[in-house]
Image (cartoon, grey):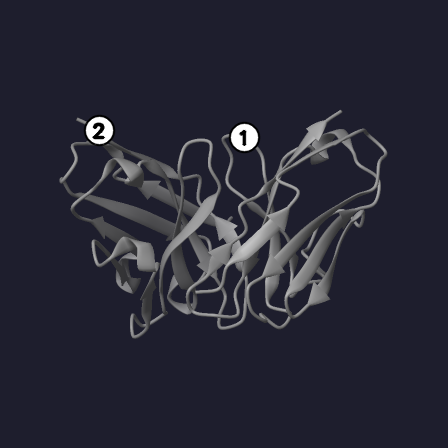
């Protein structure tokens, strides 16, 4: 199975900051990588697919990059609504896998 | 409006069984691959299983070791997860989710159903 590792596990930042979350795969997943945002008590929401494509109605301050085994999610200017948990997921293999998550906290 | 509504969760004793259901509406259910994903309290997301549009292709997480069975009924716009030999570590919110097709991401999730395994 493909293992996905995110870093950092927790990130403290302020409104207006630029933040980057990294996701590494144990083997190449091409660009079949998605990013999700999850708020407490809610279902995850798709933000980015195919590593860098922005899902409809997702603000343009979110962006994704990378291919193969290393990927990043960047939020260019944090807004209050962005404080949440973020997960990467590979969908290159039939057995899907998620990163362990990054909790974005207010500094 | 797309809707995925899970049901069937609850409290079950270790070793017991439970069947989760997910009712879909607002989209052509039979055209979508369906997944179950779970999240233990305070933990991250864990993919559980997926089933293809015609049930020909079914996949499970290795960690389940044959205890769970996914199925679907396209006539009823529903997907199911039969869970047997439940353990405390199976305690989680179970989400059903849809995927458009091969090499597509999961793009919509239900609100989840809590399964608690405890004596």
Q: Which mark is residue B114?
A: none
Residue occupying image coordinates x 71% and y 36%: A82
Residue occupying image coordinates x 80% and y 29%: A14
The image position of residue B65, as x and y in percent, is 24, 57
The image position of residue B12, as x and y in percent, is 18, 33
Position of residue A63 relative to residue B119, above or below, is below
Residue B77 seen in this snapshot: no
SS label for mark 1: loop
Residue marked by disc 2: B118
- In the picture, the quarter occupied by the C terminus of chain B is top left
Query: Quadrant of the rendered structure where residue B66 is?
Result: bottom left
State which chain disc 2 sits on: B
Residue A17 in the figure: left or right of residue B65: right
The image position of residue B104, as x and y in percent, is 54, 67
The image position of residue B85, as x and y in percent, is 16, 46
Residue marked by disc 1: A40
Position of residue A7 relative to residue A48, above or below, is above
Cα gap from disc 1 to disc 2, whole angstroms: 23 Å
Check whether the beta carbons of the residues at disc 1 and disc 2 lie within 8 A of each other.
no
């Amino acid at each position: 199975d493909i293992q996905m590792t995110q870093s950092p596990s927790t990130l403290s930042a302020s409104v207006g900051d630029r933040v980057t979350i990294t996701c590494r795969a144990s083997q190449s997943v091409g660009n079949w990588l998605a990013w999700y945002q999850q708020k407490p008590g809610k279902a995850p929401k798709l933000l980015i697919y195919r590593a860098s494509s922005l899902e409809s109605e997702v603000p343009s301050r979110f962006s994704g990059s990378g291919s193969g085994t290393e990927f990043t999610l960047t939020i260019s200017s944090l807004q209050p609504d962005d404080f949440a948990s973020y997960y990467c997921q590979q969908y290159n293999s039939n057995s899907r896998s998620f990163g362990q998550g990054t909790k974005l906290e207010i500094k | 409006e797309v809707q995925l509504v899970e049901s069937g969760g609850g409290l079950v004793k270790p070793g017991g069984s439970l069947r989760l259901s997910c009712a879909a509406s607002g989209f052509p259910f039979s055209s979508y691959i369906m997944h179950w994903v779970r999240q233990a309290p305070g933990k991250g997301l864990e993919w559980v299983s997926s089933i293809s549009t015609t049930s020909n292709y079914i996949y499970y997480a290795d960690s389940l070791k044959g205890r769970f069975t996914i199925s679907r009924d396209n006539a009823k716009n529903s997907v199911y997860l039969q869970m047997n030999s439940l353990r405390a570590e199976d305690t989680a919110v179970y989400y059903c989710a849809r995927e458009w097709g091969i090499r597509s991401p999961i793009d919509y999730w239900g609100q989840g159903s809590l399964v608690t395994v405890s004596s």
